Image (tube, rainbow, N blue to C red):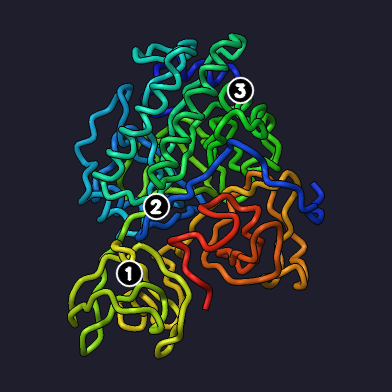
Amino acid sequence: MSRWSSRVSRAAVLVAGTALVAAAFTAPAAGYPATPGNYPSGSSATVAIGRGFDTCTAPSLAALQAWRASPYRTVNIYFGGVNRGCAQPNLTAAWVRSATAAGWRLLPTYFGRQPYCMFGTKPHRYTAGTADSYGRSDAQDAVAQARALGLLPGSALYADVEHYNRTDATCSLAVRRYVSAWTIAVHQAGYLAGVYVHQDSGLRDLSASYGNSSWARPDAVWMARWDGNPALTGWPTAPNTQWATHQRAKQYLGDHNETHGGVTLNIDSDALDAPVATVAQTFRVTSATALNARSGPSTAYPAVRSIAPGASVAVVCQGIGQRVGTTAVWDRLTDGSWVTDYYVSTPSNTTFSSALPKCTYPGQVTSTTPLNTRRGPGTNYGGTGTALQPGALAYVMCQATGTLVGTSRVWNLLDDGRWVTDYYVENRSSTTWSAPVPRCP
């Protein structure tokens, strides 16, 4: 449950408590669900894996520094919504930058309108008749609030859907309409769409409509079940094949105090393997002469501007490209241009820096059966022994030409080194390259 839910709602929480086979090349799913095909340049997804916490008011930077002694590395931020119940004196763009620079991942949650049959007393609600318009307007406001805080496109924004009475079928319909409209509008802005739900209401309903092309499927779910178990699989109300690839978080322990580094906070505890916020980080150009920023991660791409020695650059993420000096890592900047990491003051000039995410552009898998992953860009390469489930996110780093599948010869290199045909990944095109994904070196 959200940190500002009523005690009635909290009580309701306490009371309510595959073999991977080769994919047949069937036609992609029609209609919804759809995923962002319009990532702007300078965007990227970021995944958080491990433990996190949420507390009603964003902690001070001093408290976050003290909590580096904790097992948590992700902190939730309640960044907007008409039902948000706590003041946020700390939550500014400067706080977001500083928290990220200090090593924290941010889990953005928007407390908008709630279903009319919600357990609790939140005043702003929607019906089956208003769910579409409110889902869309809440999403548009969430995107505006996220941008103002410096949460870049590619970030996941989570709609808070509190526990509700799902014996009311019309109310369940309203939730599906709201979440679908939220998802579509968030996607249109180039962001990933997440949702926070209770295991016995929202998760049940969204799981039941997971493969239904009438509804836009959210990219990630954050489930509340206060059983003390942080496991992200084996959930009783959604099978492991749903939201299967860096698409799950769980709030496993409700409101309690913890003390770390001498600072006590009242928190809920979370486990994550899910997309979170992408925030640019500032580094310095270390070359002795001007550094060219290019339109792609190689000197073969044209220079788009020149950056003076010692100047600051805002780095969004890191990708692979032409080797320069000791590294093949290139940094993508907020304007979409690329610079070699060899001349940037990131923690490493030989490989990826853990402080920065890899540049990825996720798309949902559209095949109706598990999609084989391969060791290279073609069906002539051996399989990896794993597959992506229908609706899973394919975290695409770059694209290359490979064997023809359906209407496309484009293949996607994933962030973990596996390859999948682009024909079954929802993005800008099922026939050719999809900007702003770079070409593989």
The spot of residue 134 in percent (x, y) is 39, 22
- Between marks 1 and 2 in the image, the one whose residue lies nearer the viewer: 1
User: Is residue 85 shown left or right of residue 53?
Assistant: left
Q: Which mark is residue 200?
A: 3
The three-letter code of the residue at mark 3 reads Asp
Q: Secondary structure at mark 1?
A: loop
Q: CA distance from mark 3 to mark 1?
A: 45 Å
Q: Secondary structure at mark 2?
A: strand
Q: Residue at label 1?
A: 337
Viewer can see residue 267: yes
The three-letter code of the residue at mark 2 reads Arg
The spot of residue 336 in percent (x, y) is 33, 64
The spot of residue 310 in percent (x, y) is 18, 79
Q: Earlier in the sequence, mark 3 or mark 1?
A: 3
Q: Residue at label 2?
A: 105
Q: CA distance from mark 3 to mark 2?
A: 28 Å
Viewer can see residue 49: no
